[in-house]
Amino acid sequence: MAMIVLSLLLAYLVGSLPLGYWTLKTLSGREPRLSSVYNLGLENALKLMGPTAVLASSALDVLKGLVAAGLGSFAAQSAPAGTGTALPFLLLAALSGYLGHLYPLSVFSSYSMRGRGGMVLAGVVAGLAFWTRDYTLAVFPLAFSLVILAFSRHTSLAALGIPLALALTASFGASVWWAKLAAWALFGLAFWRYKENIGRVLEGTETRLGSPPPMPSEKQVVCAFMIHPLTLADLWQSPRFRWAKTLVEKGLIPARMIERVAEWFRPMKVGELYNMRTADGREIRCYLISAPLLPQQITGKPELAARKAIQGARLARELGASVFGLGAFWSVVGDKGLKVQEAVPEIEVTNGGAYTAGTVRAAIPKILEHFQQSGSRLQNITAAVVGANGVVAFGIARQIAPLVGKLILVGRNLERLEKSAESLRKNLERKRQATEMVLSTEVTAIREADLVFSATSDPNPVILPEHVKPGAWIYDEGVPPDVHEDVWQVPGVRIIPGGVVRPPGAMQGNIDLHFGTGAVPACLAETMILAAEKAYARKSLGGETKSENIQFFVERAEALGFKVVD
């Protein structure tokens, strides 16, 4: 028994050795975790790191699998009678070695590339064949893998075919039940590790051999943007989660369980936006990254959300993006992106606040002009700003305060509201304006408002029918919307969505972002503009948004061909 345990521990240690990482870094001079074969595809890895480094690394991974499996032969020598051939012990050692590669010793974890171990699996079957002299253990899995590769051109599926074929072979050829269990456990580990690739295959975004993903160049801009489902219905957009829809609808699985399971998933690439071209001829491609947390999970578990956002930024860097944008509720995570940027300095991070404020600033004069055309003088009306503690909403308040007769500021923190109001009063005094100002933490205060502007980060609608005056105009910049759908039933109410931009070209994508065909939120547009202009000093981080940055994005957006949707 001691020899069996020792063999398995040695196999795990061999699997833990980061031979591939050391080889890639030494021969290529690049950081392997930022040039991942898993994320970029084999062809781009060869271009970025060179064929010598990639092939040497692959060879060492094969050797690692071969040696790990071979260590099982020492266990077989002390095996009790009745276990038959050495194959069962070789399978256990192979499983232990692969486990070490996926989840290495803590001393080696800092060198982990989050690799899937495809070459280690190839080494495992080679080792099983070599040490048992049963070459079908290698020929069938490798042939099966090549067939999958030929038909699918997905290297990830081909790699997963190796342990699947091995498990099928062991099911018929192994002499003891636990050997079969070990073979299927090996496949189960590989399946779990390749789950992200399988999801991307289902979504049509996984790299195919011969079709390498785009890489940044002078004619191509690559960025990434982090999204999240607003409801469980959004979660079903992804084929990787769609299987659970029927189970939840029939009550076989509680929705709460799906939410809890989603917390275990690392951020994943769920889609792309493409077919965008700037006025100066450059192509824009944006990867959509998601950690499937709902709004209440992001706001209710800030530490978890910050960790997911940091992981998302690292994935974006591995995918080759130059800028990583935080969308919707991600935009307030980690001190509005500051902690994310500190944790991942290799990529530029933005919360999109500057261009969002710019689109609002550009939209307000048009709204006020149309409102006056309806027969109301601005000096005689009451306006309200909901979410006035926020950067965008306070910007709206500064813009409209000198123009209206009365301004109602609604926010959650009365002390911060009072500071904001004091700043507005000083500005009004300089302009010799006498706008009446009311502060409130209750949305019911907007009942008397003729014109309402709302920009909150609340996951649920905050403006209900009972809060709205008949005939009021409401500019809703919230994502998800701040205005409940029943407000449309209030007589004469007009609701205007805000912060929506149409990128240049005929944008296409596989995910419904809920902003209409060919349109994106302004924070996503800022991510694209920042990547195109490389004006990284203009990025939006933290709670402060400089006026010069707002104006920069407004001007550059127009020059590049971005259009605000009225």
Image: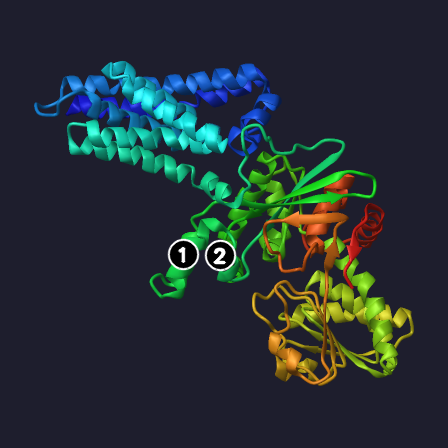
Q: Give the residue at x 55% y 30%.
A: 41
Q: Residues within 10 Å of mark 2 (few under 14, many from 20)?
A: some
Q: Is residue 313 above or below residue 216?
A: below
Decide if residue 82 is on the left or right side of residue 96. left
Nearer the observer, 349 or 238:
238
Q: Residue at x 38, y 38 (%)?
A: 191
Where's the C terminus, which quadrant? bottom right
Instruction: In the rendered view, tell whether residue 433 sits above or below residue 199.
Output: below
Residue 59 position, x and y percent, is: 44, 16
Q: Quadrant of the N terminus?
A: top left
Amino acid type of the residue that numbered disc 2 sits on in the rendered structure: Trp
* Distance from the alpha carbon under mark 2 to that under mark 1: 8 Å
Q: Position of residue 29 (x, y in %)?
A: 59, 19
The residue identified by callout 1 is 244
Q: Residue at x 60, y 45 (%)?
A: 340
Q: Secondary structure at mark 1?
A: helix
Mark 2–mark 1 contact, CB under 8 Å? yes
Q: Nearer the viewer, residue 225 or 10?
A: 225
Give the camera-side residue of 48 and 112. Answer: 48
Which secondary structure lies at badge 2? loop
Name the residue rendered at 61%, 73% in the picture: 462
Q: Is residue 423 visible?
A: no
Task: Give the residue pinned by disc 2.
Answer: 236
The percent coordinates of residue 149 (x first, y second) are 46, 29
- As drawn, is 169 to the left or to the right of 556? left
- In the rendered view, tell whether residue 112 sits above or below residue 493: above
| Residue type at the position of mark 1 | Ala
